[in-house]
Image: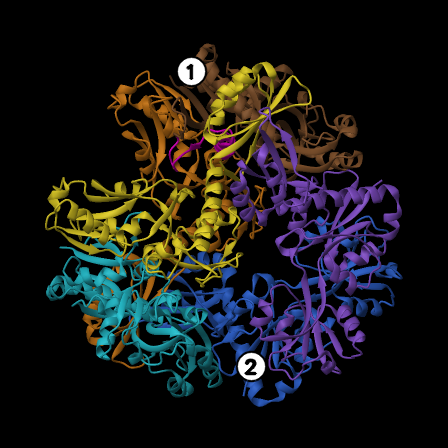
Chain colours: A cyan, B yellow, C blue, D orange, E purple, F brown
């Protein structure tokens, strides 16, 4: 029995390999090959473009795969979205598909696009969006460099953006947001009904999530005098019950917990001020709550 | 008056800039911008993908541009092919679009593809080719990594290849060659009828060709005794009449010519053996014959 | 309310960003900008040269900043030195400002410099030092490459050195050490009297120190049989009371502590020989004692 | 008293420095020098080639050193093999010395090599091996690029290989495996009889092993309800007794253990399914069992 | 007899070495040394900062050197400016010293700066400029990152700029241009009166100029029929008389000349259209007119 | 008919490829292969180490090859030295094999080495040299890092050196020079007697020499008034007779010649001062005198 898993080639590829590696699955691929090896005999990987993933998971060529929500919508694929994954600098923030026009264009609303030329890599996304707004336009497939096309080659464009800096550089104005998108772990419906495959998928997702959860977190441990224990506990965030164990010396407790990385700079001065001492922060690599 | 010129973004971009620079036109572009500057007030450049160039030159959005012959066919565009350009390591050899199947596939001829699934970036090319052979198949657009798709995701693929090494690495067999393609300088038909624009285009092409012609050539000059002149002339290739001038000393001539780089190792020993001396090879940067 | 914080541009910049990042403050800066962003709404950063930091903290343009002790002395600034920071490879060892002459110079003591030419980037430092020794000399500002100036362009130089290798390469001999210097966290006196700002500064310094303290330390945990506990405790360094907790099995204790990285190679063989087992070393990222 | 230690120059050098650094010994070397400095006054290091290490440890020029088992055999040296070290990506898998011939050579067995020409860097290894099989051949020293020599310059070669890919690229077929080899920590017999030196060597080996053991392992800690403790313990691998301590809350235990990195993806889903919670994985840097 | 020559350390150093190398003088310097070696026994080089060059040439410590016109003015040095050098991408365009204020500052003219704080690396330049305008202000030495100082740390700044992009990035507005500056070859007045030194300097400058002149030029040679000679000559730029020699065949002339790189694209089509043929462009490396 | 040519693998490989490329032979090699391809059907290349080249040319496995004179001596091979090649920065200066001892060694002369231990990569060279001096010593093969071996592992070493800086860094003193060595083009004696092979080798050597000769030379051309011709000719070096041709204007001559790169800075000022004008220097790529 084998699970056929699609890995997105291109910009997400290295981040995906890294996430899997941290989660306990070593994937590697020879240059110029698209068939990665994985150290799990029950999994077969295939590198394909994110744009096509949903198509091939949907038609059962693959059991599961990773791709963006946007491409699921674009290809109108019927797949099971098992989990949302925000695992890399690249993918942590959702990307946005936006409808843009030149800064000085007379176009102000979606309705103004009636009959206009729109260039985009997401012809499906755009057509669905326009239909919802009752607008008909000439949506033309763009092979890239879409931002440069308005106004010279098109009246408007629909493009993906993260920070908006490329839009600004090309003097474009956003008319509407069409879609927000993050990475998803998707499965074929039939495959996910199979007990063995579902278990395999769920275990993999559990590990991926454990790794992602640990990325923004750290471990804290400290010694707390008996009298101050309640106060210390009160300060600690409720994310997870702290592990409290008595020390051989009956007057002290050892308290250990996991907290958000971003809270530590606030938490440590408070903990110290209420009497915790020997506070140690240590890195963690996975957490399952 | 201004000539709107499309420069192919992507793999050919740097080579194109370099070719233009050597030909006397300095083009540069800021990162993230697609509007290059050129040191000629009569030209406006736009960076767009080679795949779309013919479409926009065809509909008059651009007056002229550089693209591959393949994309002209793919997009079925009606443009004037002004010149063939073979200017970079990348583009010197024609690329080939080939129809491939897995090495052990039962498919042997184009006819065997009837009703099969074919993945390709060149849906237009492929459909035209199949039609010529009276074959109907499901030709699906591939976003890349096309080689990996047969046999897992398609029965056959149509892909561009230069050396064939990627095909070999993916254990694919060529069933048929669909097209050979090189880079072309194309113009809009209307623009090319305009006197000013045609002159502008022709001068530019003249300079590009002068640069390309010089790349595989070198200058040779030598002193030849009067008595040996005929023999030396006989050896020199007919590419261009050598420049022969008498030296102040009446017994010697100075002979200077341009020859193919690749002939020099054969030519020099011969020239020396028939009596030429002081043979000097020097680099050249342009040649107009 | 906002704390205006100066970050030293140049050689310490990346190390400073890294120290702050590890301490829970993410600072980043666009290329060519000098106004970094920090993920704390109560802090405003400014990148300025270490040489000028004390001037601007002293006059209240900034509330606090990081700079070297040497530049505080050089600019004769009146600032509060809140903490000494030794946080990077670059800054861990103090730098030394030394008065040097060519190896074969007749100058042997500070007194021999009376009336001589001295080139230095630290005109203030040097003048103060000479005054203390009752010496008057021509101290000229050097824009850099100071080592090359003696003897061709000056009789002596005053230069900063870490390893002395640049001095040796330029065949210079040290006559006197003028100053040792490390990085300091400094504050404006008025700002430090403000309760909110002092608390903000002290919390920040606490976190920076916790990070720096952790860099040369590791965590050790081990299981110890009841009978060997006293012996194990006796071996452990007194840096921090170890955390001792009884295991469910009454015959064993779990002992956990933090020790200097450099002691581990001595400590572990000893611990093992007195009966500790299951000794595990793990990395830590912050420690507050 | 000082221990003279040989460090292998070349491909293993950086990995050796790194292993020692992680084990608590900082070794560094100036470019072009072969005498590294180490932060232990009782050790003197010398960088020499792995091929010569056993010779110089054997004759007492060095007390100890690191080298491959192959070079001990090649040089027929009489040294104490204190420990096997598998510490880097480069050295984790044993290398193999193999006797190869061109794919289409008529040579099938070792016996077929009688009287033939064999090129190899391991003349000693090869001669010993042939002698064992009663074969006499012309074994010639090869300075490198040995794979290219058959069949043009030799009938067979003996070469070291890790993955076999270089053999395949040169169309060679393995006739016999001569030797497997890993890195060894070796000592001079006399030195190892000296109490002080043996202790020094053994402590060093203990630390190196603690570091290597930790590389493929991680720490796991979790909270377990009293009722599920036995079940959780049963799942945990027997590598090391887990540390179990009661929490202040009597219904829960804290369980902490060290497991193989490669088991985690299997273990965590199981632990979760039997009731463990708050499972945290953390990195470790040394382990002594 | 020896000429002491100062080479500017820092941003111009490599370009200066390159210019000298092309001009026939090989200069090189060991890392961390400031005394370059040159393959001319009659020259001694010293690397010093451009800011200090004029000071040391002025006082005779050096006979000659390269520096910017700005630093001659800044240090108010009395030196002979032998030649202006525009030799590298870095130095071809003059740099400009500009007086800037924040975009939204009320300051509009130089007069508005009366009594204000100005930060600058060019205290001398700025003070001289303000004096000419009858303005008195607090001009403070800035160690760098000057652009960031207005308005937080100063009311205005005086800074060097090439493209203005750094000013724009820091939202600064130019109030006045203080100075334009290019690189100069300067000499000490006394040294330049010495016959041997002046000759040495003049020869060096001749070679540097020959190299710089060649950088924007190319050689053109062509065959021209007798009847067209006058027409071809008329087209050629007057930069240098073309070399015209009769060919052995009396009906043709060989014409050879040097032209500006930037004219070639215009010239070649014209030359061809009036009957020149076999037009060859070749690179040149020095030209003395 | 085919010429089997050995190309030295390793430090000279890239320089050799480059020299051949400039000489008109394009050689390239796939990574991990040792059989380069060359664009000449009459030549077969093989990459082997310089140390072994003479052995395989000597025994006829190869017809010709490039290697150092030192390795010809070391292996005592009987080969035809067709030409000396000084073609790269690496090989332009001869390397020297020197016998060295520690700076403070009592050994002063070759005779003092009687009975001592000498480590060297050149066992043959060293033994031949000692024999000439009537000295017997233990010469041991060193795998590398030879400089570190004296005095810890050997009494003296014999090592190759270019600049002596590695010797100095290891505090070694040269007792005697054993050999100077440059790169040679060698041939098998039998092969060189074959007409076709000798012609092939001689043509190749002719081209290699033409390329090497051009590297340190440049072309000069200038216009000279009739009256000054004799004076100009007198100044020009005798390397090659200048080409003098009358210009159409009878009062001027065009003079063109090839000179040493290093003379140009002296020559041009002189030429100018005697009346040459329009002096142009241009690069050349081959010269056969």
Specify whether A285 is left or right of F106. Answer: left
Q: Position of residue E243 (x, y in %)?
A: 66, 35
User: Quarter-wise, where is residue E285 in the image?
Assistant: top right
Q: Which residues are magenta?
A: F9-34
Judging by the rendered image, the residue that carries numbered circle 1 is F60
Q: Residue A25: in sight, yes or no?
A: yes
| Residue F20 falls inside the magenta stretch | yes
Judging by the rendered image, the residue that carries numbered circle 2 is C202
CA gap, disc 1 and disc 2:
81 Å
Q: Position of residue A286 (x, y in %)?
A: 32, 67
> Could you confirm whether marks 1 and 2 are on the same chain?
no
Q: Could you classify mark 1 by the number of other residues whose Cα lies within 10 Å: few (under 14), some (14-19), or many (20 or more)?
A: some
Which numbered disc, 1 or 2, marks the residue closer to the eye? 1
Q: Secondary structure at mark 2?
A: helix
| Residue D149 falls inside the magenta stretch | no
In front here: A150 or A8?
A: A150
């Amino acid at each position: 029995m084998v699970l056929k898993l699609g890995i997105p080639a291109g910009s997400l590829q290295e981040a995906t390999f890294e996430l899997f590696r941290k989660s306990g699955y070593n994937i590697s691929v020879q240059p110029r090959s698209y068939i990665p090896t994985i150290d799990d005999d029950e999994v077969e990987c295939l590198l394909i473009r994110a744009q096509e993933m949903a198509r091939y998971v949907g038609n059962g060529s693959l059991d599961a795969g990773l791709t963006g929500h946007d491409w699921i919508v674009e290809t109108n694929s019927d797949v099971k979205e098992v989990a949302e994954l925000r695992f890399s600098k690249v993918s942590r923030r959702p990307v946005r598909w936006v409808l843009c026009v030149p800064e000085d264009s007379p176009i102000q609303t979606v309705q103004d696009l009636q009959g206009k030329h729109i260039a985009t890599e997401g012809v499906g996304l755009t057509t669905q969006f326009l239909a919802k707004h009752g607008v008909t336009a000439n949506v033309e497939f763009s092979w890239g460099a879409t931002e440069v096309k308005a106004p010279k080659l098109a009246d408007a464009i629909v493009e993906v953006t993260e920070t908006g800096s490329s839009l600004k550089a090309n003097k474009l104005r956003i008319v509407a947001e069409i879609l927000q998108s993050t990475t998803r772990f998707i499965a074929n419906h039939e495959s996910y009904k199979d007990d063995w495959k579902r278990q395999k998928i769920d275990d993999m997702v559990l590990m991926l999530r454990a790794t992602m959860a640990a990325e923004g977190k750290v471990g804290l441990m400290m010694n707390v005098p008996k009298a101050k224990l309640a106060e210390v506990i009160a300060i600690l965030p409720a994310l997870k019950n702290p592990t409290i164990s008595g020390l051989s010396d009956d007057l002290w407790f050892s308290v250990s917990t996991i907290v958000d990385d971003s809270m530590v700079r606030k938490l440590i001065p408070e903990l110290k001020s209420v009497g915790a001492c020997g506070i140690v922060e240590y890195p963690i690599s996975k957490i399952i709550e």
